[in-house]
């Protein structure tokens, strides 16, 4: 008997309404029907077992829930390039890891002081902090920086210091507001004797005026003496970093949260914010934590919107809140159990596998909705709830089982791939599909029995679509051929399909740590896409560096040897000569006593008078206006309160002392050898056992995938064992793309085998899979045409399309094999249409995520599902053509008032006749 209880009858001679009939279960009840009967008759027992499972699962999830955002965990450790990454990380475990505290100040002096104090305090037993140091070994370079200048640069820097000698002596002798005013007078005497121009002093006058005006305006003043003693290109940075080695708390969902909090508290205790210092935190640890926060941000609101939309769609499909309640309780139970099973298998989720929540809801609702719509059809013909449940399971359970197994097979295709991020997703989602299927065939019948919705008053389906069904059927061949031709004619657009291989683009650019990291990446001295080579020795590292330096895509290559300056003897001699010349200027034998407030007032008025006198011969010049403006501000400061003068003195004197100390230290560098380099610097470039690190940076934008790819390939030609971010990005993209090609092939093969085992006809297997492949091609073509890039996260939509889409195709192929016609108008299409909408809403909820990776995944999943729904509803019925087998049917024996039909009557239905075509001839064979 090939009777079909869900869809409309085939056109029969004595049938005026194709939705008036439904079929009774076969005399020999199927196993699925028996399961449904047991569940319905023992509904309270099944519900109790379900509640116990939910409670246990929820408790386990609460105890074990964890998410790991480390990208390196997303791929197999057995890949050659990953083995090289692991080897490099073992040799240099701190490289690229930990926390960076970024300090932004208004002046280089403030930044330097803040970094030194923060590093010092963090090393004093601060909770959750192991150690800290100024990034880049800043103290070492402050002392020895002149040795790293080229000979012309060194000569220029030392000449500038020598020219500043007349200013240095009064400042070093009297580091106070009085001494600073004396230096202004000394500079003006230089103008009078034509040793210096007033125009050369104008920038200094502007800076001093601004500082005084900020003081008098109750603002936070700042002044930098570095502009006087350094050339522009050698000016120290206003941004410095402290590298922090945290003690992570892996019992917390955010392992680095407490360490970051300790850093911020330490900065507050030091009063850095009160000094105008901006502290920002970045690095691998805070980026991972912010990634987890981003995954949670707005998820409650997004979930509420998605659930409300799914409820609305479910109402349109079922028109029964009782059935909807049963359906949602079933999905919730399955989701809790799947979450527990997923954590048991994977130990910790990742930003990709966490998407199983959405996938389960989307597909779990599909199974439950298919069963529920079929149950409504059965209740129209059978007013006995248990009898209707038995009919539903008997007539529809098989197709649900086949769809569930095919969907699980699609997800299982992820497992053999090297991309562990989706391999875990496949493992969890495949088990989730089986759980959803079992729940729909056991828990759902029990809940439907308990909620006991009333019988249906009218048949389901869309009878008004029968004319459209027939219209499309009459034009089946041109529509099918035209669709295929259009899709394949558009295939050249796939050439422009892009893959974004940069993991940083999957993170929220608005999160503090990522925004800081991206800003740092624009600094040419802070490349985020380096390539690292592990050489057996320093000598071999230097040889590799020389080869790499000849490549046009390589901007800079560094080894430990680069920290030993060239021509040290000559440079040390030059520096020593300048140090001797400036010895008394920088370290005078006698320092003036601290001035009184009246002394400062007198010096301010004296300096103002000298300024006004100096500009008398420069009237109208811009430099004269700058001097007059400074004179006015000095007089205003002299007439201000003592507190304002103390505030101004602090703004001028503190950076002066820092600058003088730096100059003194820089004029007494050490002779540098490999043996005298700081241990922390040596350890960053030389591993125990003698292995040496070679670090190369790309030429161009290190955020540009094309630039990084060319650079990485150039480095790999020199050493195939290279590691580092650039290699990880480039090789990771290849791994992911290959993994999904493998997953797609495995999915097609496994689904095809499964379909063959159930359907036993190659043509039936082909017409099930071909629309699926067509939908995948259309999805990619739309992505290419709209500039939508694939990435490490959203690419999972393609194998998911195979797993999810095959369910819709199976529902139709089974109905077609049973002889059902007018598929577009049938209750089956109603179920598929609303099921697709609910799944689209579930997947589309990811679109609203603040996480760019999940958002792009939601976009592509929604697009892929729309394409596969269109292929299932509009294309597959036309491809299949009229059913080649329409069996003798029998009207059901009703246990309650239902459609008018004589008991036991038999109606002989003939195959629907249509014009012959290539497809119908193939089917008939």
Image: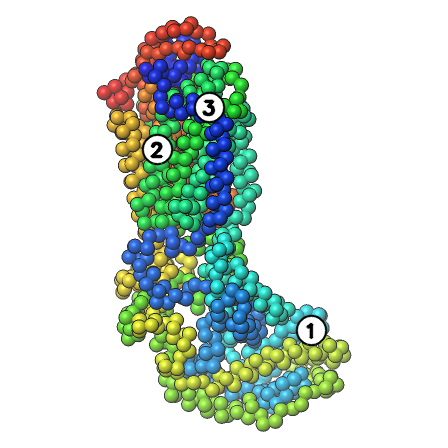
CB-based contact (under 8 Å), mark 2 and mark 1? no
Q: Which mark identifies residue 40?
A: 3
Q: Residue at x 50, y 62 (%)?
A: 282
Residue 161 position in % (x across, y down): 51, 85
The image shows a total of numbered marks equal to 3
* Residue at 36% over, 81% down: 675
Percent x, y of residue 420: 36, 49
Nearer-N-terminus badge (3/1)? 3
Rendered position, 804 above or below 31: below
Q: Quadrant of the C terminus?
A: top left
Image position, residue 377 (x, y; %): 46, 19
Q: Earlier in the sequence, mark 2 or mark 3?
A: 3
Q: Which mark is residue 215?
A: 1
Q: Is residue 41 left or right of residue 584?
A: left
Q: Nearer the viewer, residue 266 or 886?
A: 266
Q: Secondary structure at mark 3?
A: helix
Q: CA distance from mark 2 to mark 1?
A: 75 Å
- The residue at which mark 2 appears reads as 405
Which of the two marks, 2 or 3, is nearer to us in this view? 3
Q: Is residue 525 left or right of residue 450?
A: left
Q: Position of residue 478 (x, y in %)?
A: 33, 24
Residue 794 showing in the rendered view: no
In front: label 2 or label 1: 2
Asked whether the viewer can see residue 323, the reply is: yes
């Amino acid at each position: 008997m090939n009777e079909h209880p869900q869809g409309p009858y085939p056109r029969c001679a004595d049938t005026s309404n194709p939705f008036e009939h439904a079929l009774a279960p076969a005399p020999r009840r199927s196993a699925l029907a028996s399961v449904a009967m047991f569940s319905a008759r023992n509904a309270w027992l099944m519900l109790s077992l379900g509640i116990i499972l939910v409670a246990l699962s929820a408790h386990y999830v609460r105890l074990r829930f964890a998410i790991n955002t480390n990208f390196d965990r997303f791929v197999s450790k057995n890949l050659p390039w990953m083995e090289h990454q692991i080897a490099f990380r073992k040799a240099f475990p701190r490289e690229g890891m930990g926390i960076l505290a970024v300090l932004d100040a208004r002046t280089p002096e403030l930044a330097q002081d803040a970094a030194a104090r923060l590093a010092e305090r963090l090393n004093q037993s601060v909770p959750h902090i192991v150690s800290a140091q100024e990034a880049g070994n800043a103290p070492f370079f402050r002392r020895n920086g002149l040795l790293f200048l080229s000979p012309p640069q060194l000569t220029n820097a030392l000449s500038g210091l020598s020219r500043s000698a007349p200013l240095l002596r009064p400042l070093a002798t009297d580091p106070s507001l009085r001494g600073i005013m004396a230096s202004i007078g000394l500079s003006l005497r230089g103008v009078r004797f034509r040793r210096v121009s007033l125009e050369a002093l104008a920038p200094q006058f502007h800076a001093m005026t601004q500082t005084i005006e900020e003081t008098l305006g109750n603002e936070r003043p700042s002044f930098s003496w570095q502009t006087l003693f350094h050339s522009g290109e050698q000016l120290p940075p206003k941004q410095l970093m402290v590298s922090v080695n945290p003690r992570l708390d892996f019992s917390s969902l955010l392992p680095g949260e407490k360490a970051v909090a300790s850093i911020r508290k330490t900065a507050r205790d030091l009063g850095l914010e009160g000094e105008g210092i901006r502290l920002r935190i970045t690095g691998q640890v805070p980026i991972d934590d912010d990634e987890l926060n981003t995954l949670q941000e707005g998820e409650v609101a997004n979930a509420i919107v998605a659930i409300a939309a799914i409820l609305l769609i479910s109402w349109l499909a079922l028109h029964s809140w009782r059935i909807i309640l049963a359906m949602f309780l079933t999905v919730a139970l399955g989701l809790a159990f799947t979450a527990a099973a997923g954590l048991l298998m994977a130990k910790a989720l990742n930003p990709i596998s966490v998407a199983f929540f959405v996938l389960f809801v989307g597909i779990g609702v599909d199974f439950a909705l298919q069963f529920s719509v079929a149950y409504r059809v059965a209740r129209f013909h059978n007013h006995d709830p248990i009898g209707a449940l038995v009919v539903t399971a008997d007539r529809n359970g098989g197709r649900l089982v086949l769809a569930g197994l095919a969907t699980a097979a699609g997800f299982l295709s992820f497992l053999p791939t090297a991309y562990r991020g989706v391999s875990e997703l496949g493992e969890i989602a495949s088990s989730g599909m089986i759980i959803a299927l079992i729940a729909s065939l056991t828990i759902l019948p029990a809940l439907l029995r308990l909620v006991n919705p009333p019988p249906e008053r009218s048949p389901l389906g869309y009878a008004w679509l029968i004319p459209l069904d027939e219209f499309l059927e009459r034009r089946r061949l041109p529509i099918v051929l035209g669709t295929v031709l259009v899709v394949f004619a558009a295939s050249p657009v796939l050439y422009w399909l892009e893959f974004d291989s940069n993991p940083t683009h999957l993170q929220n650019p608005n999160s503090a740590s990522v925004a800081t990291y991206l800003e740092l990446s624009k600094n040419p001295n802070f490349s985020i896409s380096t390539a690292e080579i592990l050489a057996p020795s320093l000598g071999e590292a230097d040889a590799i560096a020389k080869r790499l330096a000849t490549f046009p895509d390589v901007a800079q290559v560094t080894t430990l040897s680069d920290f030993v300056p060239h021509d040290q003897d000559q440079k040390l001699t030059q520096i020593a000569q300048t140090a001797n010349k400036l010895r008394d200027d920088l370290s005078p034998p006698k320092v003036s006593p601290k001035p009184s407030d009246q002394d400062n007032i007198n010096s301010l008025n004296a300096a103002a008078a000298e300024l006004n006198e100096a500009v008398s011969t420069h009237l109208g010049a811009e430099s004269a206006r700058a001097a007059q403006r400074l004179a006015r501000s000095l007089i205003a400061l002299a007439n201000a309160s003592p507190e304002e003068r103390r505030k101004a003195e602090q703004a001028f004197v503190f950076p002066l002392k820092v600058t003088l100390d730096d100059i003194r230290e820089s004029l007494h560098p050490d002779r540098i050898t490999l043996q005298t380099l700081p241990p922390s610097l040596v350890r960053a470039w030389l591993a125990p056992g003698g292995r040496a690190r070679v670090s190369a940076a790309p030429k161009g934008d290190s955020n540009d995938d094309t630039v990084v790819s060319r650079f990485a390939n150039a480095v790999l030609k020199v050493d195939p064992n290279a590691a580092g971010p650039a290699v990880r990005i480039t090789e990771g993209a290849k791994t992911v793309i290959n993994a999904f090609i493998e997953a797609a092939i495995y999915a097609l093969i496994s689904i095809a085998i499964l379909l063959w085992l159930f359907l036993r006809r190659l043509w039936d297997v082909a017409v099930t899979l071909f629309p699926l492949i067509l939908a995948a091609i259309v999805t990619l073509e739309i992505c290419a045409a709209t500039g939508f890039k694939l990435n490490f996260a959203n690419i999972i939509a393609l194998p998911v399309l195979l797993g999810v889409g095959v369910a819709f195709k199976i529902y139709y192929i089974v109905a077609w094999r049973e002889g059902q016609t007018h598929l577009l108008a049938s209750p089956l299409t109603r179920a598929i249409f609303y099921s697709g909408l609910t799944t689209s809403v579930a997947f589309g909820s990811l679109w609203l995520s603040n996480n760019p990776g999940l958002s792009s995944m939601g976009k592509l999943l929604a697009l892929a599902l729309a394409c596969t729904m269109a292929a299932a509803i509009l294309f597959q019925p036309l491809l299949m053509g009229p059913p080649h087998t329409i069996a003798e049917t029998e009207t059901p024996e009703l246990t309650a008032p239902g459609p008018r039909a004589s008991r036991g009557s038999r109606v002989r239905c003939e195959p629907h006749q249509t014009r012959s075509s290539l497809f119908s001839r193939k089917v008939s064979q």
